[in-house]
Image: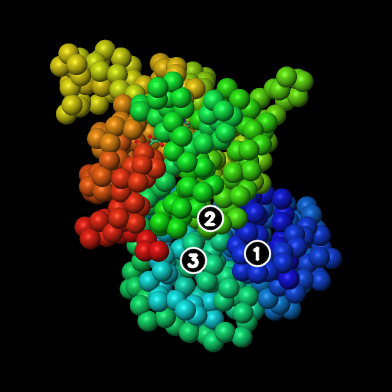
Amino acid sequence: MITLLDYGAGNVRSVTNALERLGETVVKVSSAADIDGAERLVFPGVGNYGAMMRSLREQGLIEPLLRYLHDDRPFFGICVALQALFDSSEEAPDEPGLGILSGRVKRFTTELAVPHIGWNGIKIQQPSRLFHGFSGDEKLYFVHSYYVESNDTEAVLTTTDYGCEFVSSVQKGNIIATQFHPEKSGEAGLKLLENFLNASREAVIPQACPERTELAERIIACLDVRSNDQGDLVVTKGDQYDVREDGDVRNLGMPVELAQDYYEQGADEITFLNITAFRDFPLEDMPMLEVLRKTSENVFVPLTIGGGIRNFTDCNGRFYSALEVASEYFRSGADKVSIGSDAVLIAEEFVKTGKCTGLSSIEQIARVYGNQAVVISVDPKRVYVRSPDEVRHSVIATAFPGPNGEKYCWYQCTVKGGREGRDFDAVTLARVCEQLGAGEILLNCIDKDGTNSGFDLELINAVKEAVTIPVIASSGAGCAEHFLEVFTKTEAEAALAAGIFHRKEVPISQVKQFLRENEVEIRRC
Ligand code: 1PR
């Protein structure tokens, strides 16, 4: 039996699912006595370090946790729980760490995008049972802006490179903790957890450890989901956001089955977009939450869900905050939420008033679940102009002139699934949302969506220049070469596609194979 420390934030469902997949019974605890009585304690820490330490303290969990760790009983900490083992963190200098290991937690200062999101390698520093059956060149899923600098060199189990070399896992006696998320690291992560559970396994150092590790470019499969006219929840796909063909909603498959299929083909992440949630209320959309729950039982890579994340008052006058909506998505198995329409309205207001209220959905969700959990989904379309002075938006010179020979364009934000254009540009939107605490940009493009004509590289470069957070390029992929183009001609950290995968034109495995042959860093499955 595994005791899972659930201090009330984030996605404990994924860790529970991974442990249950390995045949364990998981009991969630939140009291001191439960920790004292645990045989094996798993502590998934997510989000903000300060919020986590405060929450542990307020629930009276620090003392029992320290007792448990000082007694050297079996422990597995994940992500922020690794950081909690050290003395202090720059993220919350007033909240002391547990001090089990000596060192501190610092924010990445690098030219690379922060948060560090995606699949990176590990350099194994000492033998451990955790690596039983590993070849050594596996990649694991990271998502964090802060990293550990340890003085306890003997406890350092692996390091990873991202602008600097940081501690990616530790082992001291029976205490093990990883900065990466084994529960989101596919088969490699499951194997590592299985090795933790089997204490008698031999400690090994695998053969093929890299000298330097490199973050892989991510390939993301996107499932646009909505009810069709018969009331069934289906995966659909639009042409420039129009999902109807001969009057009917296109039906390209069942969400849970397709997500599982893409996981098995090697997708690095799965994104669900609840595309009609701007007019419906997601918490009343039980089938969508069920899709998430079922998918997370069998899919061990990160899941993002978007659609309808905003404040909402239902027909009985009950108010739901965007944070409540997001929390329900996280409880149902999401690792990140994406905000579309609401982000545009928030950014417009911010530019008008120049003030952060702390109350917007972006700020509230980032505060509780961490910046890395907040993705902004942008739905822009091109507006051509003759000269940059014509509008007060962020204008680019384009190599693809407009219908009247216009040599410039700006990217107009839209809301409500592309139905309503706003007087606001995508570059400013991305910049403002980063300032408000978003951790990643999902950059769609209505002109390119469903066209198979390749990504809008000009758009991607313009947004990428404006932000320091990771950008997911989306819309227009029609062949493997388009993915190569996006990774060689832009600095995008990930590429997302839908139609090409749904129509089975090119399987994910083939895209990845092609990229690998062209020396793009890619995760092997
Ligand atoms: O505004 O917070 O409720 O979120 C709604 C979400 O639903 C947004 O993320 C928005 O992008 C999405 N959405 C709304 N309507 C549509 C539609 O298609 N009618 N889908 C829609 C957007 C775009 C991409 C697509 C890529 C790749 N889908 O996600 O998957 O363009 O497609 P391709 O590879 O086939 O070219 P809110």
Tell me, for residue 187, which label it has, or none.
3
Q: Earlier in the sequence, mark 1 or mark 2?
A: 1
Residue 56 location (% of width, % of height): 73, 56
Q: Position of residue 27 (x, y in %)?
A: 75, 63
Q: In the visual, does 19 lie left or right of 373?
A: right
Residue of label 1? 20
Cα separation, mark 2 vs mark 3, equals 10 Å
Q: Is residue 163 left or right of residue 361?
A: left
Q: Which residue is mark 2?
A: 299
Q: How many marks?
A: 3
- Quarter residue 385 falls in: top left
- Asked if the residue under mark 3 is in contact with the one under mark 2, i.e. CB atoms within 8 Å, the reply is no
Amino acid marked by disc 3: Glu
Q: Which quadrant: the N terminus?
A: bottom right
Q: Residue at x 75, y 59 (%)?
A: 28
Q: Is residue 167 above or below residue 260?
A: below
The extreme right residue here reads 33
Between 7 and 147, which is closer to the camera in this rendering? 7
* Residue positioned 70% across, 29% down in the render: 320
Kindly identify the amino acid type of the residue bearing the numbered disc 1: Glu
> Mark 3 or mark 1, which has the lower sequence index?
1
Q: Residues within 10 Å of mark 2 (few under 14, many from 20)?
A: many
Label 1: few (<14), some (14–19) or many (≥20) C-alpha neighbours in 10 Å: some
Work out which quarter of the rendered image holds the C terminus and state it.
bottom left
> In terms of depth relative to the viewer, which is nearer, 26 or 44?
26
x, y percent for residue 466: 35, 35
C-alpha gap between disc 3 and disc 1: 14 Å
